[in-house]
C-alpha cells in the first residue's frame, strides 16, 4: 500500500497555486484532502482507502495534524519501499472546514492533448521546474493504475493478477512495491506490454528538456534518488502554513534529553492533597525540536512499547505484510510528533 500513501501526500500538497498568496485559498499541504468535497475530485479516486489506513493513527495521536500525517506517511512510504530518505519538516496547520478546500482541476491529467505542455502548466503553477517534474514522475515506480478508477490501464496483468492486496490493475514496473529507477528504464525501452506507459510518461523521453533528466535517471539510480528526495521535500511543503513558522524536523540536532523534555514525556503525578493534576508549563514546539542529541530513555521505552504492542521484539522482527512496516514507522514518528501538536 506504499503507493496510495505517496499519492495521498502528493494530492494534498499538489493543489498549490503560487499565484495566490492567501492561506488556505492557495491550496497545498493543509489536510484538506480529508474532506468529502476534495476527496470526491476525479483525480482522487481510490484515496478513501489511504485515509482509512491512517485514521487509527490520527485517533491515537490527535496532536498530529492531518497535513503533517499525510506528508509523514508519504515520505515514510518512499523510504520503506527502498527509496531515499526525505529531508522533511513538520508543523503544518490544518484547514478546519470543507468550504476551505481548493477547487477541482489543479492536479495533473494522465492523458492531456499535449502532455509536456500540460505537465509544465500544472507543475510550474506550483513553482516546480523541469528537473523536479521528471524526478517526481519517477515515483510511478510504485503502484498501479485501475481502469475503473482512473480510466487508464488494463484490468490486470501478470504482475498484478495475484496482488498483493486487491488483485488487478496495471503497474508501471514489474516490482511495483519497490522504489528504484526502473520506471525510467522501462519507459525508455517500452518492451513489455504488461507495463503501463501513459502519455505523460512517454513525454519524459519525447520532450528534449525532460529527456535530459529522464536519461540521467535511467542511467544512475543515485542521481535519481538525490534529485527525487529534494523534489519530494519541496512538494511536501507547498502552500503549507507552519506552526512554528519555521517548522521543525524530527531529525534536527537531536541531543541529550533535557529536564523539560522529561516533564513532557512523564506526566506529573496527582496532587496528594486534592487529587488534581497540576498543569505543566505551556508547551512550545520549537523548544523541544532542536539541539537534542538523542531521545530520552523514557521516549525510547514508549516507542519500544508501541512496537512490542504490535508483536515485535528485539529478538523477533515483525513479519512484513506490505503495509505493517510503514505503519510501525509512522506510529513511532507520530508519537514524537504528537508532543508538538496543537
Image: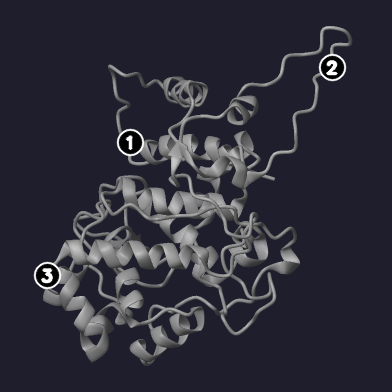
Horizontal side of 18 relative to 255 (left or right) equals right
Give the mark nearest the N terminus, 2 or 3. 3
Q: Residues within 10 Å of mark 1 (few under 14, many from 20)?
A: few
Which residue was labeled with disc 2?
Answer: 276
Q: Residues within 10 Å of mark 2 (few under 14, many from 20)?
A: few
Give the mark nearest the N terminus, 1 or 2. 2
Could you give the CA–CA distance between mark 1 and mark 2, rounded to whole angstroms? 44 Å
Name the element at disc 3.
helix
- The answer to which quarter of the image holds residue 179 is bottom left
* 306 is higher (above) or lower (below) than 117: above
Horizontal side of 34 relative to 154 (left or right) equals right
Name the element at disc 2.
loop
Which residue was labeled with disc 1?
Answer: 321
Name the element at disc 1.
loop
* 268 is higher (above) or lower (below) than 248: above
Which residue was labeled with disc 3?
Answer: 219
Percent from the top left, x then y, of residue 231?
A: 37, 68
Percent from the top left, x then y, of residue 112?
A: 40, 86
Question: Residue sitting at 37 percent across and 55 percent down?
Answer: 86
Picture quarter with the C terminus: top right
Horizontal side of 332 relative to 316 (left or right) equals right
Question: Residue sitting at 45 percent across and 55 percent down?
Answer: 88
Amino acid at each position: 500500500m506504499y503507493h496510495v500513501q505517496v499519492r495521498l501526500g502528493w494530492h494534498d500538497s499538489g493543489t498549490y497555486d503560487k499565484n495566490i498568496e492567501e492561506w488556505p485559498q492557495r491550496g497545498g499541504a493543509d489536510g484538506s484532502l480529508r474532506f468529502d468535497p476534495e476527496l470526491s475530485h476525479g483525480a482522487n479516486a481510490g484515496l478513501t482507502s489511504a485515509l482509512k489506513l491512517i485514521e487509527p493513527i490520527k485517533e491515537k495521536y490527535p496532536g498530529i495534524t492531518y497535513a503533517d500525517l499525510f506528508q509523514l506517511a508519504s515520505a515514510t512510504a518512499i523510504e520503506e519501499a527502498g527509496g531515499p530518505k526525505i529531508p522533511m519538516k513538520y508543523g503544518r496547520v490544518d484547514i478546519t472546514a470543507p468550504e476551505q478546500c481548493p477547487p477541482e482541476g489543479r492536479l495533473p491529467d494522465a492523458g492531456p492533448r499535449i502532455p509536456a505542455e500540460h505537465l509544465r502548466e500544472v507543475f510550474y503553477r506550483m513553482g516546480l521546474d523541469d528537473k523536479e517534474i521528471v524526478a517526481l514522475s519517477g515515483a510511478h515506480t510504485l503502484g498501479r493504475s485501475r481502469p475503473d478508477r482512473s480510466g487508464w490501464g488494463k484490468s490486470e496483468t501478470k504482475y498484478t493478477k495475484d496482488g498483493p492486496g486487491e488483485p488487478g490493475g496495471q503497474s508501471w514496473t514489474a516490482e511495483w512495491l519497490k522504489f528504484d529507477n526502473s520506471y525510467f528504464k522501462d519507459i525508455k525501452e517500452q518492451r513489455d506490454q504488461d507495463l503501463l506507459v501513459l502519455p505523460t510518461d512517454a513525454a519524459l523521453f519525447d520532450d528534449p528538456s525532460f529527456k535530459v533528466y529522464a536519461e540521467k535517471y535511467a542511467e544512475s539510480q543515485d542521481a535519481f534518488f538525490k534529485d527525487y528526495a529534494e523534489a519530494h521535500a519541496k512538494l511536501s511543503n507547498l502552500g503549507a502554513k507552519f506552526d512554528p513558522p519555521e517548522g521543525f524536523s524530527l531529525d534536527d540536532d537531536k541531543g541529550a534529553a533535557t529536564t523539560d523534555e522529561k516533564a513532557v514525556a512523564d506526566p506529573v503525578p496527582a496532587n496528594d492533597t486534592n487529587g488534581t493534576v497540576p498543569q505543566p508549563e505551556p508547551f512550545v514546539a520549537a523548544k523541544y525540536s532542536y539541539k537534542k542529541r538523542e531521545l530520552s530513555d523514557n521516549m525510547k521505552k514508549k516507542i519500544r512499547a508501541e512496537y512490542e504492542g504490535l508483536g515485535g521484539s528485539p529478538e523477533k522482527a515483525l513479519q512484513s505484510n506490505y503495509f505493517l512496516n510503514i505503519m510501525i514507522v509512522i506510529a513511532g514518528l507520530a508519537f514524537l510528533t504528537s508532543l508538538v501538536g496543537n
